[in-house]
Amino acid sequence: MSRKNQTLGEFIIENQAAFKYSSGELSKLINAIRLAAKVVNHEVNKAGLVDILGAAGDTNIQGESQQKLDVLANEKFIHTLANREIVCGIASEEEDDFIQINSADNNHQNKYVVLIDPLDGSSNIDVNVSVGTIFSIYRRVTPIGTPVTLEDFLQPGRKQVAAGYIIYGTSTMLVYTTGHGVNGFTLNPAIGTFYLSHPDMQFPETGKIYSVNEGNYIHFPEGVKQYIKYCQREEEDRPYTSRYIGSLVSDFHRNMIKGGIYIYPKSSANQNGKLRLLYECNPMAFLAEQAGGKASNGFTPILDVQPEELHQRVPFFCGSRKMVEKAEEFMRNHSD
Ligand SMILES: O=P(O)(O)OC[C@H]1O[C@](O)(COP(=O)(O)O)[C@@H](O)[C@@H]1O
Ligand SMILES: [Mg+2]
Ligand SMILES: [Mg+2]
């Protein structure tokens, strides 16, 4: 039974037995993510002091200008994961293709693939607003002893064995699930240890916060426009409050604690929206469902969407169950 203020290390060991394939490898993997999180946290916290603010000068496969911290966080996570004999492949927002990681005996014995958004909320890095890292973990489907293939990464979200995020905010937290609820751990920077501060996190069934970039309003589908109008009307428990940090991890985290909905819909400019299915929407959807919330593309649960490409985008509706259901109702009733 998890105890408040238990360390993350203790929690991982104690909960390992609850995991179906428990051979200790997933625990080692979560421990590696914990280590990489601390390394990146250290860099984020002193970002203004050393030369890691601003653009790195390259663009990633999505045509986005890479920030120096995007590149640094990407390197730290890949390096930390690759050196621990647990992963056979890594895919990242900042890498065009997936990275093959062979086991020390050269026999492709490792079982897990990891997909990461090394630095989420890149537009907020230089302005000292909270950012994050998102991770998603699958067991490979191709035979052990053979190199991983794209097939190992293009699994529906429902197949995830673990997912989570790190939020580098007023405090640094690691929030994750292995399919047995969602738990949040806060880093004590003085001693570099994560403690269980938010056991069994739950989305309130409904809330009064909506998060959407209204600057894109005119390009939104009619269903989203009508839902935003519904949120703003003086009726019942409305109007709701608009809150949009512009870092998915931070908007999600706030909504999970206070109740709310985050929407990044398709638009006339982006037919599939902006967020990436594999390393943004799937992990957040797994967390949302494990915390009693809901996540869809406006119609279908995100976790049931069959991925086709590594960096594919998907419209994203996520948060308190009743609010997402209401938004879906508007999408059904107001098709473009
Ligand atoms: O500036 P916009 O278009 O509202 O987009 C903000 C969204 O884009 C993101 O920054 C995309 O993630 P990255 O920063 O990892 O590319 C989300 O964190 C955020 O919710
Ligand atoms: Mg992101
Ligand atoms: Mg990113």
Image: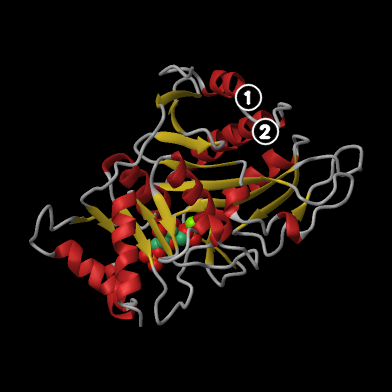
Q: Relative to 192, is 156 on the left or the right?
A: right
120 or 75: nearer the viewer: 120
Q: Is residue 158 left or right of residue 169?
A: right
Q: Residue furthest left?
A: 234
Q: Residue at x 34, y 41 (%)?
A: 203
Considering the numbered disc 2 on the image, is that residue within a helix, a strand or a loop?
Answer: helix
Label 2–label 1 contact, CB within 8 A = yes
Assign the C terminus to one quadrant of the image: bottom left
Q: Residues within 10 Å of mark 2 (few under 14, many from 20)?
A: many
Q: Position of residue 259 (x, y in %)?
A: 28, 45
Counting residues from the start of the chain, the first of labels 2 and 1 encountered is 1
Checking the image for residue 16, the label placed there is 1
Q: Residue at x 51, y 51 (%)?
A: 119
Q: Nearer the viewer, residue 64 or 6?
A: 6
Q: Secondary structure at mark 1?
A: helix
Q: Is residue 315 above or below residue 76?
A: below
Which amino acid lies under the numbered mark 2 shown in the image of this protein? Leu
Circle 1: residue type: Gln
Q: Report the side of 98 relative to 11 (left or right).
A: right
User: Mark 2 highlights which residue?
Assistant: 26
